[in-house]
Every structure is written in C-alpha cells, then in structure tokens.
Image (spheres, rainbow, N blue to C red):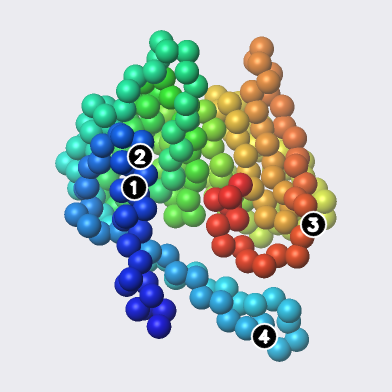
Amino acid sequence: KIVNALRMMDYGDVFRFGIAEEKIGAVDLLHGKSRTSLFLFAPPEPGSQNRVELHMRPSNPSLTEAEGTALIQHVREALPDITNTGKTQFVILGGQIFAGLPVSFYTDFITLLKNKGYKVVADFKPYLTREEMNAILSAGPTMIKPNLEEFTRYFNMGDDYAKDKLKRGEFNLIGSLAMTMSKSERIKILIVSMEEYGAMVAYDAGNGQYKVIHVPAPKIEPVSSVAAGDSL
C-alpha cells in the first residue's frame, strides 16, 4: 500500500506549479528523475513511550559537470539582477551537492547569486564533506544553518562529545566555535540547530563586532522529528 501510494504522488507537479507561478522558467536537468525520502513509523518498543522512526533516504540522481554548467547558465539568464533596485531578496539553497558535480559548483553558484544582488542562505545537509562545506563558506553566503552533527564534523569534533557538553548545560564550547566560524568566514548569521538544546546563533553586529546568543528550545511533547531542522 505504501509503495502504491508513493507511485501515485507526483512531487514534480508541485515544483512545476511553483515555477509557473513565479514565472522564472524551468530547466529539467534530471530528465524526470527525482528522489523521494520515506519515513516509516513503528510502535514503541516494550517499556518505551517513543515510537521508532526509520528514515529511508535514497541516493540523489547525479549530474554531469556539463549539466551543472547548464544550470548555472540558466540561472544567469532567467534570474533578474536586483543589484541597483533597492530590493532585498533571498535565495535559499539546500547544502547538498549532486554527485558528479565538482566541489567548485556551489562556490560558482553562490557567487553568481550574490553578483545579482541576492542574499544567499545555505542549509547544510548531513552528507556534506568538510571540503564541500569549505567550498560553500568560501563563497560568503549571508546565512548558514548547520545542525549539530554537521557543525561538529566541520571542526573534526565528535557529535557525542558535543552533546555530552550540552547535557551538562555547557554551551560555551559551541558558542565559541560558532563565533569563530562566523567571524573567520564573514558569515552575517550562523544558526546551529541543537535539537532539544535549542539553537546557537552567531551574527555580525556591525563595526567589526560579532555576537553569539543561545536560544533555548520550547518544552514540548515531541510527535516526530521529521523536517524539524527544515522548519527551523
């Protein structure tokens, strides 16, 4: 039943509708292929109140370097230049690079968007290598939002070590590292999502000053963690 239901869903229609509404044109580089992630929920195990979540995440379709170049060219031609219009508009990018593309692809893509006057938000994804993270950071996006796992991987620090610090109420380490990354990479806003421990926000306060604040998470009865980071 699950498989049949997924076959009936055409997520491409959702994107085609949005593209048509925004009148930005479309380019199909995947030739009809897309990726559908699947979450399965199992009843709680004996003695537990928490149901089991299984995330089935298939691999992305791959793009060739030529197809990546075609995508950049399409954006260059289709996206209007707002540099001298006085407008503030954001482009949000999922931080995962398609297989087959060079690491420099994201650097070139972000640079193009910035040159057209857009603020760029890069949302890191779990599979990014440190080299790919550096490529994104070197392009100078306005804002990035790594989660704790991605953030600690960048600093070659174990996720468990960081969580142990947070469990003890020690937030200084994450705050200090967030400040370091924001300042050294000239990121205007850096948000590290830390699950039930809230979020650490480092930002450019102006005049060469950077500040960091911890935003506690509200106390709730969690139903599911699906897309919690995306919602943030």
Q: Residue at x 31, y 48 (%)?
A: 16
What is the number of callouts on the image? Answer: 4
| Secondary structure state at the residue bearing disc 2 | helix
Q: Are marks 3 and 2 in contact (CB under 8 Å)?
A: no
Query: Badge 1 is on which residue?
Result: 17
Judge depth for marks 4 and 2 and give the one in front: 2
Kindly identify the amino acid type of the residue bearing the numbered disc 4.
Answer: Glu
Which disc number belongs to residue 21? 2
Q: Residue at x 75, y 40 (%)?
A: 214
Q: Are marks 4 and 1 in contact (CB under 8 Å)?
A: no
Kindly identify the amino acid type of the residue bearing the numbered disc 3.
Answer: Lys
- Furthest residue in direction right, as rendered: 169
Q: Earlier in the sequence, mark 4 or mark 2?
A: 2
**Residue 199 appears in view:** yes
Q: Are marks 4 and 2 in contact (CB under 8 Å)?
A: no
Residue 141 location in percent, x, y? 48, 30
Residue 224 location in percent, x, y? 63, 66
Label 2 crowd (10 A; few <14 / some 14-19 / many >=20): few
Kindly identify the amino acid type of the residue bearing the numbered disc 2.
Answer: Glu
Q: CA distance from mark 3 to mark 2?
A: 38 Å
Q: CA distance from mark 3 to mark 1?
A: 37 Å
Question: Which image quadrant for residue 212?
Answer: top right
Q: Residue at x 21, y 48 (%)?
A: 29
**Residue 129 appears in view:** no
Q: Earlier in the sequence, mark 3 or mark 1?
A: 1
Q: Nearer the viewer, residue 113 or 129?
A: 113
Instruction: Locate the N terminus and report the quarter of the image it occupies.
Output: bottom left
Q: CA distance from mark 4 to mark 1?
A: 42 Å
225 vs 93: above or below = below
Label 4 crowd (10 A; few <14 / some 14-19 / many >=20): few
Judge depth for marks 3 and 1 and give the one in front: 1
